[in-house]
Image: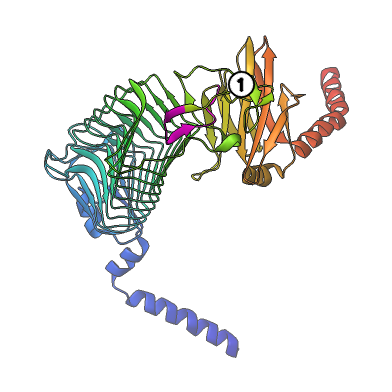
Amino acid sequence: MGIERIVVWSLLMVIILTLALPISQIKIQLKSVITVPDDYSTIQEAINRAKAGDKIFVHEGIYYENLIVNKSLSIIGMDRNQTIISGSGRGITIKIISNGVWIENLTVRDSGNTVYDSGVELSNVKNCTIIRNILAENLHFGIIAEECANVKIVGNLVANCEATGILIKCSNNSLIEANLLLENNGHGIAIQESFNCTVINNEVRGSKDDQIAILASNHNFVIGNDVTYGKSHGIRLDDPSDNNMIVGNTIKKNEGCGIWLFNSRNNVFYQNNILENDENVKILQAPGYLSNDTWDGGYILGGNFWGDFINTDLFSGVYQNLEGSDGILDEAFIIDDYNVDNYPLAGPVNIVHFDYEMNYCCIISNLTILNFRFIKKLNVLSFEIPTNSHGFCRLTIPRKIIKEIWNNTYSIYINESLVGFEKIEDDKTVCIYFHLDTTNSVEIKIVDEKSFVLLFLLIIILSPFFRNFKVTKTCK
């Protein structure tokens, strides 16, 4: 009975203490999701009443507000095409001054048109995410992050801004990924006085100034971007900008230079498609300043595909003195006395990413590569080749990925038939090279050798069961 009394008294005390709390306090503790306009008529009022960690869901409609987000919370629109925040032509439409803010699924428009007015401004914050929004219509800048860290700007459409689409200024360790930037009157993306930022898988078109500008910024990564049809330069490094990596990008049909460098050095360029620009590359330097950059990743990774550089691929090897082709042109591409691509590629580049770092697979091929993808659930890397294909494929894959995904045991199959290949490797990268000669469209897969064998054996073992099952079902 003593234990029972203790339990009863404990429960009573919990009930009494709970009832003693003010009703408003109980409401604040339980409330974690706020809906606009159901709970509050304006988004700013919802922000003011929210606590850190809350989520604010915003229904479709036009909200004429200039928001100040001063708490760590999420603001999520129900439909990014129909949930619209208009700054009414003045100031900054959304200003973020707190860490850990998440902005998603909104149309943000109508900022002011003075210097540094923008659709979204992040000021001296960290760990914020701007994802899957539309920033367009009468914005001066699209998104500005200034004096920030660990900002993620992912999957946004930024179009027709009067100035730069996305500006990262004095901000480090940030990710700009998979955004679509169209017809902005300034730069498409600008990284200014910042380091260790990653600009990856963005599509940048029609910028009136440089499409991607790296300005007085060091140790940044520009990977796998599609940079086309700009009114000025494709990728610009200036002011100076040193020790950046420009890898796996397509830089095509820009009215200025594909790549333009001024007083910048020790940058690395490889596995880029650089073609059909008014001038593919231009290097300028002040008197006494030596711009010496690296234009290839060594023999295994190769250099760049220069669309206007025509040469043979009859030889192979580090010195291109062994018989047999290897996807590397036999002669170096000389830019000037200090800048040489020693291993220009014999075909365009296609890449697929495994993560946000430098872990990706690259295909260099004179064939048309279709539906290049990594199927994570199956640990299968695959792509397709159309009918009447005759040419080569040169794949480079980080050894780290070969080990983690395939445990160093992999095979290549064309329509489930095993294919032989040549392999070149070092401690960081594996290069796979093979020829194709087919009149039919084919799918090519790189798979775990053990998994494929087990699957094949499983099909053989189970096939009598399936045959019996079908017969039984028919007789019934």
Return the residue at label 1: 384
Q: Is residue 264 above or below residue 203?
A: below
264 or 244: nearer the eye? 264
User: Is residue 297 left or right of 291 when viewed as pictured?
Assistant: right
Residue at x-position 44% and y-position 32% = 249
- Quarter-wise, where is residue 266 in the image? top left
Total label count? 1
User: Vertical placement of 202 versus 442: above or below?
Assistant: below
Viewer-closest of 319 and 305 = 319
What span is in magenta? 334-346
Estimate how packed mark 1 is, as few (under 14), some (14 to 19) or many (20 or more) residues with alpha carbons within 10 Å. some
The image shows residue 215 at horizontal and vertical percentages of 29, 43
Q: Secondary structure at mark 1?
A: strand
- The reply to whether residue 376 is in sight is no
Residue type at the position of mark 1? Glu
- Quarter the C terminus occupies: top right
Q: Is residue 341 magenta?
A: yes
User: Viewed as shown, does residue 29 lie left or right of 410?
Assistant: left
Residue at (24% x, 45% y) in the render: 120
Left or right: residue 241 versus residue 47 is right
Q: Is residue 224 visible?
A: yes
The one of 403 and 50 positioned closer to us in this rendering? 403
> Where in the figure is residue 318, as x and y percent of width and height?
63, 33
Name the spot of residue 83 as percent of width and height, x first.
27, 37
The part of the image, by quadrant, that contains residue 437 is: top right
What residue lies at 67% left-to-right and 9% top-to-bottom? 439
The N terminus: image quadrant = bottom right
Residue 63 colored magenta?
no
For residue 84, what is the image quadrant? top left
Tell me where residue 140 appears, x and y as whole percent: 18, 37
Q: How is the image coloured?
A: rainbow
**113 versus 442 height, above or below:** below
